[in-house]
Image (cartoon, coloured by chain):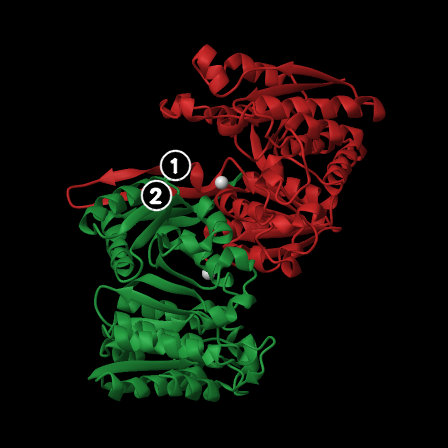
Chain colours: A green, B red
């Protein structure tokens, strides 16, 4: 029995979580799995009732579970709140409370949707499957000291990019292990010709490669990587990088697919639970209209099955079911361009279940 | 009379500089300009004779000139030298000696070459013309302290991103003035939701906008900008950003054109001389074969005429001549795909001169 915390959140969050649960229930019997679900409010939905986007009860509930499925948070209703009460604090707070230091973003272009890419077909090919492992809790965004100093004649602002050997090792380990489960190619991205943090990063990752002899490691400078993602994205299997570079490169990579509403992610730490979520937002403008695309959330469930429960077969089955639904021509509102069979959120969930 | 320092450097550097000089001579009479040229060795060519990639004599010669045209440096012959003797130190040393703190990279896609872009035509359009203004001497790459500390149980590496108000103002001024000469739209890129340096950056740039009422300023987060460059590059006129973000974004932007060998750049400081150079390298493998594309160097001369000599007409004439040569079907080796009229380096120079 695996317990899964469901945190639907705001906007389209609840609708897409419903479809993901539908899929989880469908794989239970078939793959000899058993799930128990525990639901809780987060984001604006939580702020409305409890005055905070993430209650201690919700954190406690999550810590008691084996995995967390997070929908999406935020909306214009809560935009005026002070920063610490905003819905977005829910996900930041959870990552922190649970020690989730690695963010895995899956950049998948399905053959059926390859026309949606902004990149020419002869470059992007028929399909794309990159996994970006981004360090999530260190580096420039969190390093100390940071601040703004004002003297009588000058103002100086500063931030610190810092990494310890242990911070680098633990995220690199996840990247190596991820590569082992995939095409066994790892590209570590840094700026080792200029930055001390990158120099340490490169040394440690290079040393660790000896423990993963089946993984082919290469290093790439971040500015070159931003070019290579456009020029030849098919060269990448797993990309490992630090927080700031990962922020920029993972967003660049995600738009190569032309359907950012399709992409799942995982946040991983040293112990369970890990957290899974679509990378898209809460889309309050289409909430309740049946226009939401549940596929990113359903693919997040596939990542959960693989990474948290070791159920690789069930994970593959879900990915294949999504692919079949797309190949049969079914499309939600956001990916409907030229499609004949436009379906609602729950219809798409049903079709994917049928294809399992 | 304007004096121009010519620093051909290594590989194809001398060949492309020859063509650029040809163009400068051709505009002299027509636009009532008068140039005097002073040549000096840099890079590997200087290291071979003087034991250093940049001599004090060369720096002194440059300081005496009104503008500098730099070719390209480097090659396998000098790759084994210790860092401080490598050809690349020539350009770093010059920027430092001359206080060149703003790097302007022109991202142009000519209609005739629009098929070469990796981006679909319906997205990139027929033409593209973005100017990226990157802060060049501050930020994370140069901030202090930086280093690696080792204690008995832990290693910690750190770099500092820092900016003073004056450093931000001087580069922003150049960006606002550049926008005034173009489409009058300026996008300032930062990560102000996370970084203190970005918060100061955004505050200062916002305040300065009052002095440039004709320029429409907007702000964009760096991760969003990396997406927007792929999704809708035509939205940008001038992009202003700090050193590290500029490194990543300018490289990403340059490959959107599909012909990185076509792109010029300028490095600008508070007083003359400014330095102009193609963004491509020295391409030692094709040096001397007539295969080098002189257009990036010729367009660098156009930037020189505009930025150093205020000769906007002459600059436009050169750009138009390049465009006509391309429209007539002439191509150098690197951009020859499907072309009927493949010409040598000096033939391309001659054709551009004829089109002036
Ligand atoms: Mg981001
Ligand atoms: Mg670069």
Residue B54 seen anywhere in this rendered image of the structure: no
Quadrant (top left/top right/bottom left/bottom right) for the C terminus of chain B:
top right
Residue at the disc numbered 2 = A198
Task: Indicate the chain on which mark 2 is placed.
Answer: A
Residue at the disc numbered 1 = A193
Q: Residue at x 61, y 76 (%)?
A: A338
Q: Position of residue B176 (x, y in %)?
A: 68, 45
Q: Element type at marker 2?
A: helix
Task: Using residue B137 as the reference point, say whether residue A105 is left or right of it.
Answer: left
Q: Position of residue B354 (x, y in %)?
A: 79, 29
Q: Position of residue B117 (x, y in %)?
A: 60, 50
Precedes in sequence: disc 1 or disc 2: 1
Task: Using residue A266 as the reference point, say whether residue B231 is left or right of it.
Answer: right
Q: Residue at x 55, y 87 (%)?
A: A289
Q: Where is residue B165, by image quadrant? A: top right
Q: Where is residue A132, by image quadrant? A: bottom left
Q: Is residue A247 above or below residue B325?
A: below
User: In the rendered structure, are the residues bearing label 1 and label 2 in contact, judged by CB atoms less than 8 Å apart?
Assistant: yes
Q: Is residue A58 above or below residue B11?
A: below
Task: Indicate the chain on which mark 1 is placed.
Answer: A
Q: Residue at x 32, y 53 (%)?
A: A185
Q: Element type at marker 1?
A: loop
Q: Position of residue B246 (x, y in %)?
A: 53, 45
Of the pair B287 and A280, the residue shown nearer to us: B287
Residue A179 seen anywhere in this rendered image of the structure: yes
Of the pair B233 and A144, the residue shown nearer to us: B233
């Amino acid at each position: 029995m695996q317990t899964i915390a469901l945190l639907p959140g705001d906007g389209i969050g609840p609708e897409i979580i419903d479809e993901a649960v539908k899929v989880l229930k469908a794989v239970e019997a078939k793959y000899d799995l058993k799930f128990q679900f525990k639901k809780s409010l987060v984001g604006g939905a939580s702020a409305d009732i409890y005055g905070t986007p993430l209650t201690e009860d919700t954190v406690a509930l999550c810590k008691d579970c084996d995995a967390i499925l997070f929908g999406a948070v935020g909306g214009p209703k809560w935009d005026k709140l002070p920063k610490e009460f905003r819905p977005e604090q829910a996900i930041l707070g959870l990552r922190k409370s649970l020690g989730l230091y690695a963010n895995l973003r899956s950049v998948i272009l399905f053959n059926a949707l390859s026309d949606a890419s902004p990149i020419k077909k002869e470059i992007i090919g028929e399909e794309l499957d990159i996994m970006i492992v981004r360090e999530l809790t260190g580096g420039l965004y969190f390093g100390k000291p940071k601040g703004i100093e004002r003297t009588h004649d000058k103002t100086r602002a500063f931030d610190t990019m810092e990494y310890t050997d242990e911070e680098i090792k633990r995220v690199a380990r996840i990247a190596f292990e991820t590569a082992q489960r995939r095409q066994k190619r790892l590209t570590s991205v840094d700026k080792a010709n200029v930055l001390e943090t990158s120099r340490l990063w490169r040394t440690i990752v290079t040393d660790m490669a000896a423990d993963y002899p089946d993984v082919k490691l290469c290093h790439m400078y971040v500015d070159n990587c931003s070019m290579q993602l456009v020029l030849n994205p098919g060269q990448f299997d797993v990309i490992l990088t630090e927080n700031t570079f990962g922020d920029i490169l993972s967003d660049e990579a995600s738009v190569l697919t032309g359907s950012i509403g399709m992409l799942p992610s995982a946040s991983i730490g040293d112990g369970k639970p890990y957290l899974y979520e679509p990378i898209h937002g809460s889309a309050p403008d289409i909430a309740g209209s049946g226009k939401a695309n549940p596929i990113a959330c359903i693919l997040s469930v596939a990542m959960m099955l693989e990474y948290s429960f070791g159920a690789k077969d069930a994970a593959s089955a879900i990915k294949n079911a999504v692919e079949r639904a797309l190949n049969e021509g079914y499309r939600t509102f956001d990916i409907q361009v030229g499609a004949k069979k436009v379906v609602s959120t729950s219809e798409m969930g049903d079709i994917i279940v049928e294809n399992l």
